[in-house]
Image (cartoon, grey):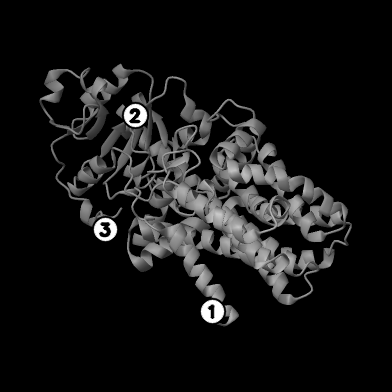
Amino acid sequence: MSRRIQTISILVLIVVVLGLGIQKAGLAGVFSDRLSGLLAQDETTYASGAVSLATGSGWMTPKVLGRFYLVKPPLLIWLAGLSMRTFGISRFALRFPVLLAGSFATLFLFLWSERRYSRWAALITLLLAVGNPLWYTFSRICYTDMLLVFAMTGALWTFDRDPEFAQTRSVLLFGGFLAVGTMTKNVAGLLPLAVVVGTCLVSRHRLPVANLFKCCGVTAVLIAPWHLYQFIYHPRWFWTDYVKIQLLQFGFEPPAQTSQEGAAWFYLKRFVLTDPLLALLSAVALPCLFRAVRAGKREAALLLSWVAVTCGALLLFHYRNLPYLLYVIPPLCVAAAAYAIPRLTRYPKFAAIALAAVFCIKAASGSYLWGLPSPSTVSIPSEKWFRWYANQQRPNNLIAVNSDDEFYGSALPIAKIHYCNLDPAQLARRYAPHYAYLGITVSVDQFNHIDNWKPRFKERLLEWGLHTDSAIATNIMAATVDEIVRLVETHDRTDFYLPTKIVRAIPPETLSARRVVPMSQDRYFLLAPEANERYFSQLGWSVPQNW
């Protein structure tokens, strides 16, 4: 069997292992942080933007809920939209680009370990990676993090093969991977540059400055068109979302945290609890790695620099988010296979067999923090209710109050959905103050008089480059339950999705004018008389079975 066929066979095997049952979990139906009980809410945001591209246009500037989505670069939404344009709208098509990214990242680690160490070390590295719950989970959902891991791993795999970037192919590859990372996660895509610099400093090798500049030139050429376009056509939106909020606000003064734990303890605790075996092997490997660095081994310096740079980035970026821990998993897997396993046993074959058994145990123990999430059907409880509503093809606007859908409704063909939250602390304004200025986030009083406010908001949106008013009032902030009751009373041609406790506060005469549809003990739809127009046919798609 030729080398190329072997590599393709390994890649196919990785795709099968990571992708089995990938389409069964509903959108946002898995935990992004099991310990904190956080669902993968961002997946519905990316799905909303991607389905808009797949069914329409606006590829240069994706939109979510009618507004420009410039908090992150668009590469993931582009890839997911292209996949759904090609294969049709489905969970599998949405997640397929990320599955490929996770599979290629795993393949890079296998080839890296095989070239540097041995075939058994490569197999152990592969088993450690696919058996890591974070690696497994984020290879199977539409999140940016695995795409960045792919870019980082590809860039540093290229550097390991050609530390001087002497070949033109290496310059193009490294620069291309930096571009993929930057178009996925902003400046985080440039972390491989810091790793390369750290490697050369630690190993006392000459930094290939001239060739690194060539790599950066390739990156600049690839990322410049989109960045220049946004800077020219949407400068205020681009600066506010892309720089001010995503980098400066979340980087240094997050408006809220998912946990009050310190950053180091937040990540260390979750690393140990989600993968105690890799944590143990990493603890064994690190002293050996330090000794190898002192002995002048550049490959060890690369792994150590990778760990140090990514850990430093986790601590420097103040917003704490478990998926960020993915960035340190690749070097730890390689270090564990190359330095910990040889110290623990002289028989790597038996270690590989043991790790294969551990993978099977993890796959059968999906309910535990350290287990691999089961591929059986999982979805948020309200998914089927919002699917039901979308299939009614209602022309009315829908206001979802304190919704439990994780923004799933934003990825469905609904005429227009508004999310209303009981928010006396004005948290929404702290997350995105400019949304209030632009009329994207409004108070209940403003919404009740929206015809008076709309001309002012449309003018402001136009100044910011958005030539549509579909984003107006997609977020409604209510200070009290009474305000929400008044909202229902005032808007008699609008549908509502409401918690039971709020339905009980609505006067009977108001309820009698609507069709009350109980979806569970906790949630109801209130359906108003239909408007005269039908918008559904203009939306261009219906809800597929697997969405």
Residue 36 vertical placement versus 388 (above, below): above
* Residue 541 numbered mark, or none: 3
At a point 21% along the width and 35% down the height, the residue shown is 495
- Among numbered discs 3 and 1, the one appearing first in the sequence: 1
Secondary element at image label 3: loop
* Residue 173 numbered mark, or none: none
The spot of residue 129 in percent (x, y) is 57, 54
**Residue 228 at least partly seen:** no
Measured Cα–Cα span from mark 3 to mark 2? 27 Å
Answer few, some or many: residues within 10 Å of disc 2's Cα (few below 14, many 20 plus, some between 14 and 19): some
The spot of residue 430 in percent (x, y) is 52, 29
Query: Mark 3 is on which residue type?
Result: Trp
At a point 55% along the width and 82% down the height, the residue shown is 1
Mark 1 highlights which residue? 5
Between 52 and 347, which is closer to the camera in this rendering?
Answer: 347
* Residue 402 numbered mark, or none: 2
Seen in the image, is 405 located left or right of residue 511? right
Secondary element at image label 2: loop
The spot of residue 122 in percent (x, y) is 63, 63
At a point 39% along the width and 43% down the height, the residue shown is 471
Residue 547 vertical placement versus 506 (above, below): below
Answer few, some or many: residues within 10 Å of disc 3's Cα (few below 14, many 20 plus, some between 14 and 19): some
